[in-house]
Image (cartoon, rainbow, N blue to C red):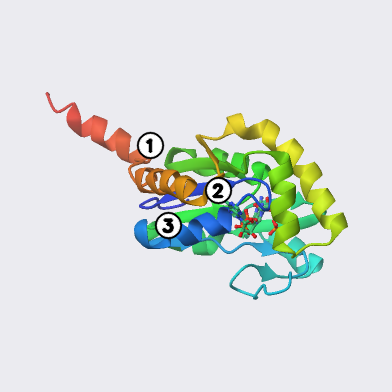
């Protein structure tokens, strides 16, 4: 059972779409939020820090966490496991925070199934596939093989944009950040089902 005083904002989109850049842009404007740090079995990229970008663990440790029901959701992406630990999300939600996830399309469906009434989902994408390729090459964090894998993955992910509440095309960074800022602020207005039911019961106050 998750106590739901807070709300969830799911961000998905191809690796290289600009999710981290956009969050950095709106960071100061969206109130108190908790950015969920996922656990992954993939190796850290250059510059990535344990506990900041991800919790980097072995496959054995990840599978133990699955068995112990420690994940809100998890998925196999590009051959590596990625998962959202339940405990910090539960804590942040009980404190009334906006909880932000950077998760893939499978994770979005899982979160929608478990926390749909308090979740707003956004698919972020560059304007075209060639622009995505260009940005991944410029970011210089992945090998050619990894970039090719991400491009292939992106063409599959883009087919599932209709599963999201919003699509943000990150062409000009400031324009996209303005849109995402409004979505993040509005996401806080979601009311969980149990609170709506309570309200309806009280509203029907004529004996
Ligand atoms: P993600 O977090 O989705 O993987 P990043 O935020 O790391 O993506 O962005 C990928 C690369 O694209 C980075 O080098 C970033 O500086 C660049 N980038 C992000 N948004 C834009 C934009 N609107 N125009 C040009 N380059 C961008
Ligand atoms: P990257 O390797 O570029 O950091 O992430 C690859 C993909 O995994 C991205 O689409 C990202 O959104 C997704 N991802 C990261 N963490 C999680 C997670 O906890 N759960 C799920 N389902 N996907 C995740």
Give the answer, above or below, for where 152 lies relative to 87. Answer: above
Label 1 near label 3: C-beta < 8 Å?
no
How many tags in the picture?
3
Instruction: Find disc 1 in the rendering and name its residue.
Output: 193
Front position among marks 3 and 1: 3
* Disc 3/disc 1 C-alpha distance (Å): 28 Å
Q: Label 3, label 2: how many angstroms apart (C-alpha)?
A: 14 Å
* Mark 3 crowd level (few <14, some 14–19, many ≥20, 10 Å Cα): some
- In the rendered view, does 145 fall on the left or right side of 124? right
Whereabouts is ligand 2, in terms of quadrant? bottom right
Q: Is mark 2 within 8 Å of ligand 2?
A: yes
The residue beneath circle 2 is 11
Sequence-first disc among 3 and 2: 2
Give the camera-side residue of 139 and 99. 139
Indicate left or right for 182 with 53 as reference: left
Q: Position of residue 88 (x, y in %)?
A: 51, 64
Q: Secondary structure at mark 2?
A: strand
Q: Judge: label 3 CB < 8 Å from ligand 1.
A: no
């Amino acid at each position: 059972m998750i106590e739901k005083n807070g709300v969830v904002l799911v961000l998905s989109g191809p690796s290289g779409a600009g999710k981290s850049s956009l969050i950095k842009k709106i960071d100061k404007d969206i109130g108190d939020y908790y950015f969920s740090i996922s656990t992954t079995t993939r190796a850290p990229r250059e510059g990535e820090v344990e506990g900041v970008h991800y919790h980097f663990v072995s496959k054995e440790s990840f599978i133990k966490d699955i068995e112990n029901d420690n994940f809100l959701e998890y998925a196999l992406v590009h051959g590596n496991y990625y998962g959202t630990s339940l405990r910090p999300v539960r804590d942040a939600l009980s404190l009334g925070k906006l909880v932000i996830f950077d998760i893939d399309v499978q994770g979005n469906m899982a979160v929608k199934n478990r926390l749909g009434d308090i979740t707003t989902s956004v698919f972020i994408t560059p304007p075209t596939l060639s622009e995505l390729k260009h940005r991944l090459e410029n970011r210089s964090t992945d090998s050619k093989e990894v970039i090719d894998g991400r491009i292939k993955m992106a063409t599959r992910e883009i087919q599932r944009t209709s599963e999201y509440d919003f699509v943000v095309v990150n062409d000009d960074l400031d324009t996209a950040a303005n849109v995402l800022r409004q979505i993040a602020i509005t996401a806080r207005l979601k009311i969980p089902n149990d609170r709506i039911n309570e309200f309806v019961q009280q509203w029907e106050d004529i004996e």
